[in-house]
Image (cartoon, rainbow, N blue to C red):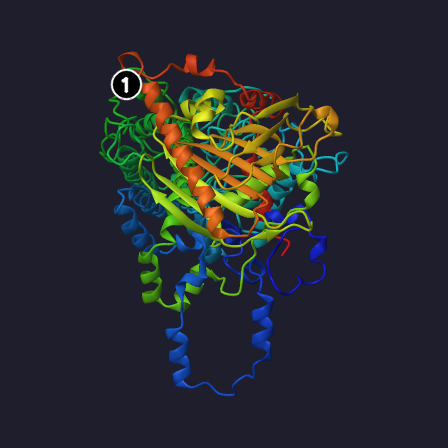
């Protein structure tokens, strides 16, 4: 086990800590659901400080001088800012935006502010027209729902994922428990159930905003398909897996003609209890828990926000058109200014940008058609209140289309009155559902928040600008958005010695990579530059100790490097053996030895010869500094691709090998640890690399100065190496880049791409990031 250095021993029972503790709350989002009530559970006390404070006599009275002394002693630098809590405060966001203006990246905060306003307008529109939102928010839990709506706007996780069809194996067992059955899928499934039950228990009056059938999705995502569909191009999928055209709706109406006319003209509002609870605006802004529709699974439209009775009111018909136009215009402004390709404030949305725009085109067509429909009191297809049709531009540079999948108004004209009313009711529900902020901007919110959390937010919380802001706001305000870490905090860096001996790799290693990549107060910024590429480097302030005499102390080091080329180019350069020698000279020496490769097993029980992930055994001789002896790290590694966040991860950990593995043990001083590379697609022309080592290099002295020198050297090697490689590639004939066909044919000398491909064949479109977020939230519920 690893624990922080302290002159006191940890409390009894800490020795029983397992690797499950690594996913316990320690990062901003872990406090989202408890609304900061779990702070005491997220921090740990410094035992020296506790003992000293407890031994001091307490004063029986408080004087004004003591109060002023306390106020003057307030130090905002001793607080860890909670992202999801702080971002709910408009003053905090304004200060953050001012900070981002210095580097001209304020568009992310502006986008969040606009979507927040759009969400408020959307909820207000539903309530005004007597939709299900009105029933939900008029109950006794109004404040709770509003709080959750506001809060969920700033999460960076998709709260729940339907796992009914996810049959690929998962491996959350400890590396040395090969025979145990995996449990990740059950964890995600359990999490979904917890959310459903939690909302059901809140109030019997709660009604779903929308209900989707099994073939639909509530969030505009380009990932998380069925894991059995191998090598699927997730980025090509539309935000809604099933496109609902108005021709399908007409077919549905024709089928309903044979049903009772009394039902069509009934003025009774459907009972909320008859609906299946799946999702609402009270849930996470980026996802919903899908469930079976109470209607037929074949029905193309299985959701109802408004009842037929509510839309028979003539004023509601006019209000529906008015609200649709207002919401559409507001959404159009956001799309044109922040999402449209080539716009002035284009966000870094990566591959999801095109899928969002594709979804927006469908919304545009349906809104345009809805604006031309008559209402319940109309006898013709003309617009009864004289309101004009929607603007001809859809925000994506496209004008009105001559051909459209929607049904023409002339077809509606020949419908009888009951059928026309039913059609208007269906169209109204469809349009308002498609304009739902979660469906329209959910994936963009996810990407923007993830981008802020990984890049700008860690720099902002260390800035003088924030310290000044918190000083002005005072201690009470700071405590509302942050956790006091003056007496220590829970770092969750526990690991067992055996975990760096076993040759196998399981889910826990992947989750741990996400965990250590998160920003915490333990990171010390040691390097910050924009030339040749934007880059930040950190090391951990605290050494961590294994329960082994051979390991002196683990140190964390991290670099975040931005390269202005696509993910495909950067990833292929990384996998190329010759290129690796240029950007990673420290590790790619002449004594780099590649040994056995073992493909992944398709099902448990797992073992070294039957591993859950593809394994490659290797050994490196590390030239750290000129005055230090060569370090040898013998390790096993694999690589995966996560489609949800469009990221490649390379992960390796030291291990103890057997003679049959052909790994030499006498190259140099033995080093131990874990190594991670994470390659994120920020946009089509920008890639973020997060490189982390968590290692014991067996240095002669435990010196931060030596560690800083080593890490700065490595960071500069990566910067210059990638710059030289890409400069060489762009200096080809006619100044053009090497084609993707040429890149993919480059030698995969370390079998890194082979590992990705083999793991993809087993796990399909599985998202480990999603599972990690769900596991953290599940862990939080047990406090």
Q: Is residue 183 visible?
A: yes
> In terms of depth relative to the viewer, which is nearer, 268 or 65?
65
* Residue 413: percent from left, percent from top: 33, 22
Q: Is residue 446 left or right of residue 90?
A: right
Q: Residue at x 41, y 22 (%)?
A: 569
Q: Quadrant of the C terminus?
A: bottom right
Residue 230: name its quadrant: top right
Image location of residue 7, percent across then percent down = 62, 64
Element at label 1? loop
Give me the residue at 43% from left, 16% from top. Answer: 743
**Res 426 quadrant in image:** top left
Quadrant of the image occupied by residue 193:
top right
- The residue depicted at 54 percent of the width and 62 percent of the height is 488
Seen in the picture, residue 510 relative to 581 is either above or below; the reply is below
The crowd level at tag 1 (other Cα within 10 Å; few <14, some 14-19, many 20+) is few
**Which residue, given by chain and number where applicable, does mark 1 sit on?**
401
Q: Residue furthest bottom?
A: 60
């Amino acid at each position: 086990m690893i624990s922080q250095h302290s002159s006191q021993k940890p409390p009894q029972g800490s020795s029983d800590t397992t690797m499950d503790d690594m996913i316990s709350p320690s990062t901003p989002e872990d406090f989202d659901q408890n609304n900061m009530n779990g702070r005491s559970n997220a921090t740990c006390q410094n035992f020296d400080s506790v003992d000293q404070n407890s031994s001091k006599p307490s004063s029986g009275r408080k004087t004004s001088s003591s109060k002023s002394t306390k106020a003057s002693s307030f130090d905002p630098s001793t607080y860890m800012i909670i992202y999801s809590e702080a971002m709910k405060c408009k003053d905090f966001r304004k200060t953050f935006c001012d900070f981002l203006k210095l580097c001209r990246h304020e568009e992310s905060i502006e986008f969040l502010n606009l979507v927040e306003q759009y969400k408020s307008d959307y909820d207000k529109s539903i309530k005004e027209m007597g939709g299900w939102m009105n029933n939900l928010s008029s109950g006794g839990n109004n404040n709770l729902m509003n709080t959750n709506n506001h809060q969920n706007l700033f999460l960076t996780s998709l709260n729940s994922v339907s796992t009914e069809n996810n049959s690929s194996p998962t491996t959350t067992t400890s590396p040395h428990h090969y025979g145990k059955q995996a449990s990740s899928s059950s964890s995600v499934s359990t999490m979904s159930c917890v959310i459903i039950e939690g909302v059901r228990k809140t109030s019997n009056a709660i009604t779903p905003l929308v209900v989707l059938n099994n073939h639909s999705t509530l969030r505009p995502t380009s990932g998380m398909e069925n894991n059995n569909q191998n090598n699927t191009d997730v980025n090509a999928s539309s935000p809604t897996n099933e496109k609902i055209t108005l021709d399908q709706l007409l077919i549905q109406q024709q089928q309903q003609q044979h049903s009772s006319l009394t039902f069509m003209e009934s003025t009774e509002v459907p009972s909320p209890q008859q609906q299946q609870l799946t999702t609402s605006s009270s849930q996470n802004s980026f996802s919903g828990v899908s469930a079976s529709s109470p209607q037929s699974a074949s029905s193309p439209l299985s959701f109802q926000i408004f009842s037929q009775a509510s839309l028979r009111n003539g004023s509601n018909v006019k209000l529906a058109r008015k609200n649709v136009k207002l919401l559409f215009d507001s959404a159009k402004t956001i799309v044109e200014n922040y999402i449209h390709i080539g716009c002035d404030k284009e966000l870094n949305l990566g591959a999801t940008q095109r899928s969002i725009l594709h979804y927006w085109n469908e919304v545009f067509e349906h809104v345009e058609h809805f604006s031309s429909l008559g209402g319940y009191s109309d006898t013709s297809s003309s617009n009864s209140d004289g309101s004009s049709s929607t603007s001809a531009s859809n925000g994506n540079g496209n004008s009105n289309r001559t051909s459209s999948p929607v049904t023409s108004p002339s077809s509606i004209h020949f419908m009888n009155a009951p059928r026309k009313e039913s059609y208007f009711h269906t169209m109204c529900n469809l349009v308002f559902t498609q304009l739902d902020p979660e469906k329209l901007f959910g994936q963009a919110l996810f990407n923007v928040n993830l981008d802020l959390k990984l890049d700008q937010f860690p720099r902002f919380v260390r800035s003088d600008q924030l310290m000044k802001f918190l000083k002005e706001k005072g201690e009470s305000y700071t405590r509302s958005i942050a956790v006091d870490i003056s007496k220590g905090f829970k770092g969750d860096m526990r690991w067992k010695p055996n975990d760096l001996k076993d040759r196998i790799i399981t889910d826990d290693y992947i989750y741990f990579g996400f965990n250590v990549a998160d920003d915490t107060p333990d990171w010390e910024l040691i390097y910050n530059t924009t030339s040749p590429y934007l880059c930040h480097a950190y090391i951990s302030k605290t050494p961590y100790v294994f329960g082994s005499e051979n390991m002196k102390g683990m140190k964390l080091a991290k670099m975040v490097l931005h390269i202005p080329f696509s993910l495909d180019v950067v990833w292929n350069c990384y996998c190329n053996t010759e290129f690796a020698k240029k950007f990673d000279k420290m590790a790619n020496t002449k004594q780099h030895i590649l040994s056995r490769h073992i493909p992944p097993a398709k099902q448990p029980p797992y073992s070294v010869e039957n591993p859950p992930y593809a394994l490659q055994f290797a050994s490196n001789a590390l030239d750290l500094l000129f005055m230090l002896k060569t370090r040898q790290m013998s390790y096993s590694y694999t690589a995966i691709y996560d489609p949800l966040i469009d990221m490649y991860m390379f992960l390796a950990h030291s291990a103890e090998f057997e003679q049959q593995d052909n790994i030499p043990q006498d190259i140099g001083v033995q080093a131990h640890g874990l190594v991670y590379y994470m390659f994120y697609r920020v946009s089509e022309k920008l890639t973020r690399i997060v490189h982390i080592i968590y290692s014991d290099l067996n240095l002669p002295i435990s010196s931060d100065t030596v560690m800083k020198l080593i890490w700065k050297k490595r960071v500069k090697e990566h910067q210059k190496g990638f710059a030289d490689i890409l400069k060489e590639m762009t200096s080809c004939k006619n100044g053009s880049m090497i084609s993707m066909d040429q890149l993919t044919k480059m030698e995969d000398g370390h079998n890194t791409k082979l590992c990705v491909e083999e793991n993809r064949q087993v796990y399909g479109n599985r998202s480990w990031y999603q599972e990690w977020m769900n596991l953290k939230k599940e862990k939080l519920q047990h406090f």
